[in-house]
Image (tube, rainbow, N blue to C red):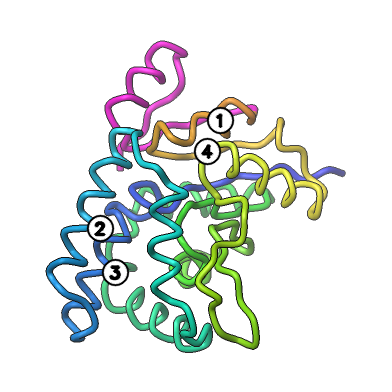
Amino acid sequence: MTPRAALFDLDRTLVRKETASMYVRYLRATGQATWRDSARIGWWVLQYTFGVLDAQKAAVEVISSLRGFSETAMAARCDDWVRRDVLRHVSDGARRVVQEHQRQGHLTAIVTGASPYAARPVARHLGIDHVVATEFEVADHRFTGRPALPLCYGEGKVQKAQLLAERLGFRLDEAIFYTDSYTDLPLLLAVAEPVVVNPDPRLLREARRRRWPVLRW
């Protein structure tokens, strides 16, 4: 029997806040980032909220700054950050919905534009088995400074979700997808059940027009 899949965005969906700015605050608190880094991320978050972010340009800029950095060190850093700052912002509503899908035997996955280093600790915490994210190119266990394309954003998110479906044997057009962001409209249109969570203004208008369910948690 073909499994059914429930797919979840990360920022402002499973986690009530946006993780990129939380990560920069963590780096500042640990002496690894500046106010300029915070301002730059804040500007990107604002553009993302209104659906006008040049995601590829932003990703290239962020990932290029990691050239030569150890992937193992990044994973350890993010495990500490998520445990310290992020898990307390996982909403009770999100926990209940994930658990209900798991109770029904649905395959669960996080599908996010964030990095896998941010998403995997949240997935482990919630018992979610699969993560689809924006991957960083790695050679000899260190980042090359380039993203692995496509980015998990817009149409790229659909492509990466489809690859997961083919690998795990579920149908994307029978899946459920939860997200807050208008930038995820392509994936919302690709699944059987789009569910809007804590939506940004453009997605709320689209959800009302299409009569999609809107959750707030």
Q: Which mark is residue 41?
A: 2
- Of the residues under marks 4 and 3, which one precedes in the sequence? 3
Give the class, few, some or many, for how many residues have Cα within 10 Å of label 4's Cα (few <14, many ≥20): some
- Of the residues under marks 4 and 2, which one precedes in the sequence? 2
Which residue type carries mark 4?
A: Gly
Judged from the image, the secondary structure of the residue bearing numbered disc 3 is: helix
What residue would you read off at disc 1?
186
Check contact, mark 2 vs mark 3: CB within 8 A. Answer: no
Looking at the rendering, the stretch of residues picked out in magenta corresponds to 192-217
What residue would you read off at disc 4?
154
Judged from the image, the secondary structure of the residue bearing numbered disc 4 is: loop
Q: Is residue 44 left or right of residue 141?
A: left
- Of the residues under marks 1 and 3, which one precedes in the sequence? 3
Which residue type carries mark 1?
A: Pro
What residue would you read off at disc 3?
23
Measured Cα–Cα span from mark 1 to mark 2: 24 Å
Q: Is residue 138 left or right of residue 178?
A: right
Give the class, few, some or many, for how many residues have Cα within 10 Å of label 1's Cα (few <14, many ≥20): some
Which residue type carries mark 2?
A: Ile
- Of the residues under marks 2 and 3, which one precedes in the sequence? 3
- 97 or 115: nearer the eye? 115
At 35% from the left and 41% from the top, the residue drawn is: 53
Judged from the image, the secondary structure of the residue bearing numbered disc 1 is: helix
